[in-house]
Image: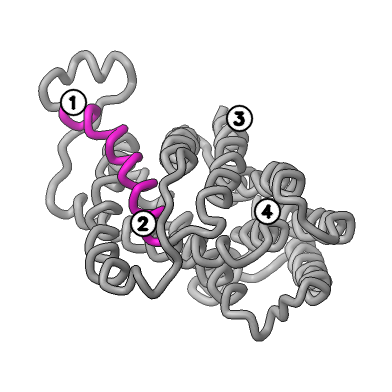
């Protein structure tokens, strides 16, 4: 059941990426992210209030969000800081990169999770994982050569740096999610996380973007901004549900969730009419094959 929930999460995550790219093209990044997160908060506001006023009803429909203590609030706040930092970097990268470049790099999250485990926990790789790492690095390098044809030099392009750091932070968030969901109710985590992300984004909007908005890309409202928040709420709901089930493996869930790149790459390439799709597609399959081997080797 957790694998099905992870796959459904991947579908909505792929749609979320398409809405994100549509919203960001020629638009200001910070207000797009702020209003998208505000949409998520608006969805969960009735859940939190309703859980307080009528806990029995919200328990019956599976949306009860219990109260959190101070320590739990701090734990959710830490998650929000990690994720919002990742989002800010990823949104800027998506605005300035073709989605057929952005999505495959974003799919390497499980690779960075493994690197973190090697550095932090001194884990050792087995043969299958070494093959997976080699494949991932090889096809990632080949992927960088495809980017050069579009004038994107991976070693010198700051937007590539942004998406790599965003992906690393996403991997950190994934590891932390397994820890936090084992200790705090998943609905409460998602609800309060949505509130904290707005609390973090509001000063960023008011203090960083607003004073300099006339010197940067103007903000234009688009309906797809609301769709970002809605699809992310659904994707995260399914993701947290998968994590909460007995026997769920974060390594497998992370890999299944990142299969969203296939939908993002295919639809994005068609919608935005991007270049070198056949070559990028072959390299993307190679990257995903490496990630799959890394994941299978972790079982």
- Percent position (x, y) of residue 46? 22, 28
Crowding at label 3, few (<14), some or many (≥20) Cα neighbours within 10 Å? few
The foreground one among 142 and 295 is 142
Dividing the picture into quadrants, the one containing residue 101 is bottom right
Q: Is residue 244 left or right of residue 159?
A: left
Do the residues bearing badges 3 and 1 touch, measured as CB atoms within 8 Å? Answer: no
Q: Is residue 40 left or right of residue 90?
A: left
Q: CA distance from mark 4 to mark 1?
A: 38 Å
First in residue order: circle 1 vs circle 2: 2
Q: Which residue is mark 3?
A: 4
Q: Is residue 39 above or below residue 214?
A: above
First in residue order: circle 2 vs circle 3: 3
Q: Secondary structure at mark 3?
A: helix
Range drawn in magenta: 30-50
**Dot in front, 4 or 2:** 2
Q: CA distance from mark 1 to mark 2?
A: 30 Å
- Percent position (x, y) of residue 125? 69, 68
The answer to whether residue 44 is magenta is yes
Q: Which mark is residue 31?
A: 2
Q: Which mark is residue 51?
A: 1
């Amino acid at each position: 059941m957790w694998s099905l929930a992870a796959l459904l999460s991947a579908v909505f995550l792929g749609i979320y990426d398409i809405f994100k790219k549509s919203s960001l093209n020629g638009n200001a990044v910070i207000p797009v992210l702020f209003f998208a997160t505000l949409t998520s908060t608006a969805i969960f506001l009735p859940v939190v209030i309703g859980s307080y006023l009528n806990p029995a009803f919200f328990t019956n429909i599976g949306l009860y969000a219990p109260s959190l203590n101070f320590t739990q609030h701090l734990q959710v706040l830490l998650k929000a800081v990690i994720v919002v930092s990742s989002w800010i970097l990823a949104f800027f990268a998506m605005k300035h990169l073709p989605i057929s470049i952005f999505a495959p790099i974003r799919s390497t999250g499980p690779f960075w999770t493994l690197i973190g485990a090697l550095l932090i926990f001194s884990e050792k790789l087995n043969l299958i994982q070494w093959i997976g790492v080699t494949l991932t690095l090889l096809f990632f390098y080949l992927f960088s050569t495809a980017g050069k044809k579009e004038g994107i030099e991976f070693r010198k392009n700051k937007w590539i740096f942004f998406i790599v750091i965003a992906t690393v932070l996403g991997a950190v968030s994934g590891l932390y999610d397994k820890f936090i969901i084992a200790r705090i109710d998943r609905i409460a985590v998602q609800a309060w996380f949505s509130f904290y992300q707005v609390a973090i984004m509001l000063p960023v909007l008011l203090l960083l973007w607003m004073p300099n908005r006339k010197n940067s890309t103007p903000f234009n409202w688009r309906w797809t901004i609301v769709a970002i928040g809605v699809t992310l709420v659904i994707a995260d709901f399914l993701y947290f549900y998968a994590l909460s089930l007995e026997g769920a493996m974060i390594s497998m869930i992370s890999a299944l969730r990142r299969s969203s790149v296939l939908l993002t790459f295919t639809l994005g390439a068609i919608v935005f009419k991007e270049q070198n799709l056949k070559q990028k597609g072959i390299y993307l399959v190679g990257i995903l094959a490496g990630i799959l081997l890394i994941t299978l080797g972790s079982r």
